[in-house]
Image (cartoon, rainbow, N blue to C red):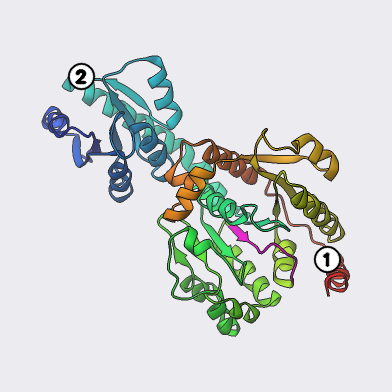
Amino acid sequence: MEKIRVLVADDVAETRENIRRLLYFEKDIEVVGEAENGEEAVRMAEKLSPDVVLMDINMPVLDGIAATEMISLRVPTAAIVIMSVQGEQEYLKKAMMAGAREYLVKPFSSDELADTIRKVYQLEQKRRAVLAPTQAGTSERRNPKIITVFSTKGGVGKTTIAVNLAVALYQQTRKKVVLVDLDLQFGDVAIMLNVVPKRTISELVQEIAQLDSELLEAYLVSHSSGIKVLTAPLRPEYAELVTASHVEKILNLLKENYDYIVVDTPSYFQETTLTALDLSNLILLLVSLELPTIKNVKLALEILDTLHHKGKVKLVLNRSSNDIGVKCADMERSLNFQVAAHIPSDGRTVVAAVNKGIPFVISHPGSKIAEAIRELTSLVIENGGRRREQAAESKEAKGILARLFG
């Protein structure tokens, strides 16, 4: 008989040992691992893929609620049971919102514990059986989406949004996600993810004649969050090696194997950026409540309209705050364009995440800014849309742009 594999997470060694004793004589249940804090619980859950996680609510490093949320997103097959001496409704509500399946109040008997483990395991098996046909049908009808994050003003948080969006897309969909850094001169995706690429897009394009999906995969960097990354050149002067035709071939190849391609771009129009915008299903245009940025975004919207891309644009207000002088409603009237998503200002969380090279949707999953990214992710999933086939019009518009910007 296949045993139910259980991971125990509790900062008290005696409690972990007591749980082992309580389950020792249950022939259908096996304790496969122990963790003494929330961070260790997340790591072990990813490594062991247990059927059930017994999670204490009060733990050091990362508390049980935050660890539950992370495991629910990263290891969705694990059913989590929260354990606590506190039985208040508020704790129960927080646990369930984080993704827990059940809640046990300490102390509990061996029968209580074993019955709860079996119940959540059986419910999880039923849920998987119901979802399996739907997921199989979905995989047969792949609809890959390219999402380009763009702004005509530097310093508005494009890369931060792109990095966290890519990770959140993987967390919420468990589909294949790749992040492409097209800020070819000064791309920061690698440093924000704390990865050290051996080969970048500038080396990749030197093999463009032989490029296929297998070769392209060899140039992608795997990140611990589950996403893949194609990094920008290591030196600014290598940027000129990458052309618009290279970008077109790379993005189209990525669509063959990836469900979501998130593209980070520089803060100006150039041929490689225009190609990404042409191929995009969705363009996230970032704006902040500052007059220079608003002015630039207004110009960008006019150009995107000329390029016949305005219908693909979603306006994202970053560092949204009521304390700033310019009001969001005034900005919307000036741009004649509605804001689709608001990302709150949270410098402390963002700077800490950037300096550690850990996206804040991982390091601070309970923060308001991480919640805003998850809402933006849901918007992307729902509104990816289909690419408009308007190659001829785009080509004509590119000619206009080339004359405008030399």
Query: Which mark, residue 203?
Result: none
Q: Nearer the viewer, residue 345 or 104?
A: 345
**Residue 104 located within the stretch drawn in magenta:** no
Residue 105 lies, in percent from the top left, at 27, 19
The residue closer to the viewer here, 402 or 260, is: 402
Residue 340, percent across and down? Answer: 71, 40
Which residue lies under the disc numbered 1?
394
Note whether residue 359 is visible: no
**Which amino acid lies under the numbered mark 1 shown in the image of this protein?**
Ser
Residue occupying the point 67% across, 58% down? 154
199 or 380, which lies in front? 199
Q: Is residue 267 visible?
A: yes
| Residue 136 against residue 213 in the figure, above or below | above
Which disc number belongs to residue 108? 2
The amino acid beneath tag 2 is Phe
Task: Find residue 342 and report its image quarter.
Answer: top right
- Give the CA separation, mark 2 to mark 1: 66 Å
Q: Which residues are magenta?
A: 261-270
Q: Is residue 385 left or right of residue 257?
A: right
* Helix, strand or loop: magenta stretch: loop
Total label count? 2
Answer whether residue 262 is magenta in the image: yes
